[in-house]
């Protein structure tokens, strides 16, 4: 990212709770999603306290407290990103109460516990190589076209692209006017103004870059063509390269 953008706090409070729609009640939402787990943790906390099992009580209470905090204090641009934090609290709590919910329990109780974990088991089985062929990050064909287009360009010269995590220019290590919004936000940059300018460029509006540092190049590939309108390219861009459906434009700075 071309530096200069101001930073925003990475933390914000969400009173509704993690990804809960406004139309769904608070207790209803958590009950449907994590009801058995919440009941098990609270029950374990009560038993540990009564039996004075402090070595079990303290880590369970810590996991439950952190889960509650990170379900309402968001540390990422979108609420669902916080799953990376709360899932560890969930796993930590399961580890601390595993003896309580499993050992010395009747077969009926163990069967109920097993049923609660069936959704997670199905996801795990689906992730195994025999059932899963992985996730395609980028097409080698598209990456090769980008390499041909950018092979004579300095990687330190700023390029304007459509903000996407799988963009070939980003994966090839070129400096960007603005990269994927999730990455930019998570590093504390205020990207709103730059995103507006990027949108204007691909909409064919007159180029008016703000800030001290400006891009030298504008990229137009399959990702960009999905958002371009007939007015693209706007005045101020001149084509300097082409690799099939990938094009490169030089910014004519005033």
Image (spheres, rainbow, N blue to C red):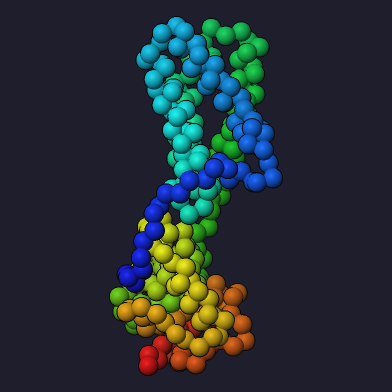
Q: How many marks?
A: 0
Residue 95: which quarter of the image? Answer: top left
Q: Is residue 247 visible?
A: yes
Q: Return the x and y of residue 174 as percentages of the image width and height.
A: 36, 72
Q: Is residue 144 visible?
A: no
Q: Quadrant of the C terminus?
A: bottom left
Q: Return the x and y of residue 8 as percentages of the image width and height.
A: 39, 58
Vertical side of 143 occupied by 209: above or below: below
Residue lying at 45% horizontally and 72% vertically, measured from the top left: 193
- Tell which of 217 and 29 is nearer to you: 29
Residue lying furthest right in this view? 23
Q: Return the x and y of residue 88 as percentages of the image width and height.
A: 45, 35
Residue lying at 59% horizontally and 88% vertically, measured from the top left: 231
Q: Return the x and y of residue 185 as percentages of the image width and height.
A: 43, 59
Q: Quadrant of the N terminus?
A: bottom left
- Tell which of 7 and 161 is nearer to you: 7
State left or right for residue 26 relative to residue 78: right
State left or right for residue 91 relative to residue 227: left
Vertical side of 191 occupied by 82: above or below: above
Residue lying at 47% horizontally and 68% vertically, measured from the top left: 192
Residue lying at 46% horizontally and 12% vertically, measured from the top left: 48
């Amino acid at each position: 990212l071309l530096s200069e953008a101001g930073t925003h706090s990475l933390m914000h409070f969400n009173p509704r709770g993690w990804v809960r729609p406004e139309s769904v009640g608070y207790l209803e939402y958590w009950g449907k999603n994590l009801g058995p787990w919440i009941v098990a943790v609270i029950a374990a906390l009560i038993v540990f306290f009564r039996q004075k099992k402090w070595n079990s009580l303290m880590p369970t209470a810590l996991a439950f407290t952190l889960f509650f905090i990170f379900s309402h204090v968001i540390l990422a641009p979108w609420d669902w990103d916080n799953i990376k934090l709360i899932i560890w609290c969930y796993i930590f709590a399961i580890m601390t109460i595993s003896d309580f919910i499993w050992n010395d329990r009747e077969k009926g109780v163990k069967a109920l516990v097993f049923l609660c974990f069936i959704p997670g088991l199905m996801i795990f089985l689906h992730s195994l190589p025999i059932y899963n062929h992985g996730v395609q990050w980028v097409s080698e064909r598209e990456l090769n076209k980008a390499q041909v287009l950018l092979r004579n360009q300095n990687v330190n010269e700023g390029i304007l692209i459509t903000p996407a995590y799988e963009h070939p220019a980003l994966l090839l290590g070129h400096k960007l006017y603005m990269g994927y919004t999730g990455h930019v936000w998570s590093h504390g940059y205020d990207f709103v103004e730059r995103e507006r300018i990027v949108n204007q460029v691909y909409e064919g509006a007159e180029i008016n870059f703000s800030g001290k540092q400006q891009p030298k190049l504008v990229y137009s590939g399959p990702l960009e063509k999905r958002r371009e309108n007939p007015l693209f390219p706007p005045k101020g861009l001149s084509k300097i390269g082409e690799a099939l459906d990938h094009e490169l434009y030089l910014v004519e700075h005033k």
